[in-house]
Amino acid sequence: MTNAIAPRKDEPGDDSRVAGRSIAPRMPVTALSPVQLEDRATIYRSETARREVDAFRELRTQLLSLADGNFVTLVAPVSRGSGGSFVARNLAVAVAFDESKSALLVDCDLRHPSQAATMKVSLSNGGLIDYLEDPEGNAEDVLYDTGVPRLRLLPAGKSRETGAEYFSSFRMRLLLDSLRSRYPSCHLFLDAPPVRGAPDARILADLADVVVLVAGYGRDTPAAIAQAAAGFDPKKFAGVVFNEGV
């Protein structure tokens, strides 16, 4: 995996709140073993240097240099199969390596959600769509331990053909604003659907502070990458990650 991240100016979020119990990411009851993490295509710390882990640590360092405090990062693949979910998950894990920080991974690919299945998380209370469709829903109920210290998952829940009306809703914005403003050590990563073919990723970009585009190495053409990047606000656009595999 190769990467290129460009610096940008940060924009502060508001301090909107959502009533309810604590929704801060917490430590899992039982941490996963290295074998279990490899089975989940998830990086982990070890005594031996590993190229993949080092790459995500470098990406994390570059992202954290863009702004003070926590922020919302949108990770959007150019096309399906580019590896956006893989990059989003492991960027969140890399942030959670730091014991002073935590991370929340939000699966926003409503048509093809994958994070819960990949991380083998059992959805007892649904996910993001269930929360957004229920005015009385409590965000804490749809945040799940992942087995990775300081990383929790907000899965997509019910599948939908499009997320445009959900992602542009006031309830969605209020949820994200609450998570970031109430818990300053928690960084949010939005796993977006592909940029090509639907407006969802661009709508989600309005909710994010930083946008990272994921291109499949040897898969997405320079023209396709440039076209996808052009759809995002240059002030938010951090750069392109070239992913060699999903």
Image (tube, rainbow, N blue to C red):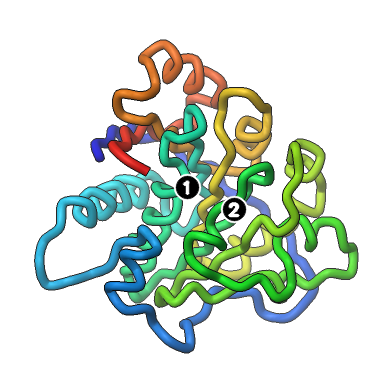
Tell me the residue that label 2 is attached to: 107
Image-based side of 231 in relation to 31, left or right: right
Residue 63: assigned label:
none
Image-based side of 210 in relation to 1, left or right: right
x, y (%) of residue 6?
33, 32
Residue at the image point whose x is 69% and y is 70% from the top: 142
- Inspect the image, locate mark 2, and give the three-letter code of the amino acid beneath it: Asp
Residue at the image point whose x is 48% and y is 28% from the top: 78
x, y (%) of residue 210?
49, 41
Residue 75 vs residue 238, the one in the foreground: 75
Tell me the residue that label 1 is attached to: 85
- Which of the two discs, 2 and 1, labels the residue nearer the N terminus? 1
Q: Is residue 91 above or below residue 232?
A: below
- Inspect the image, locate mark 1, and give the three-letter code of the amino acid beneath it: Ser
CA distance separating discs 2 and 1: 8 Å
Instruction: Please say whether residue 120 is visible from this viewpoint.
Output: yes
Q: Is residue 152 above or below residue 60?
A: below
Residue 84 vs residue 9, the one in the foreground: 84
Image-based side of 168 in relation to 42, left or right: right
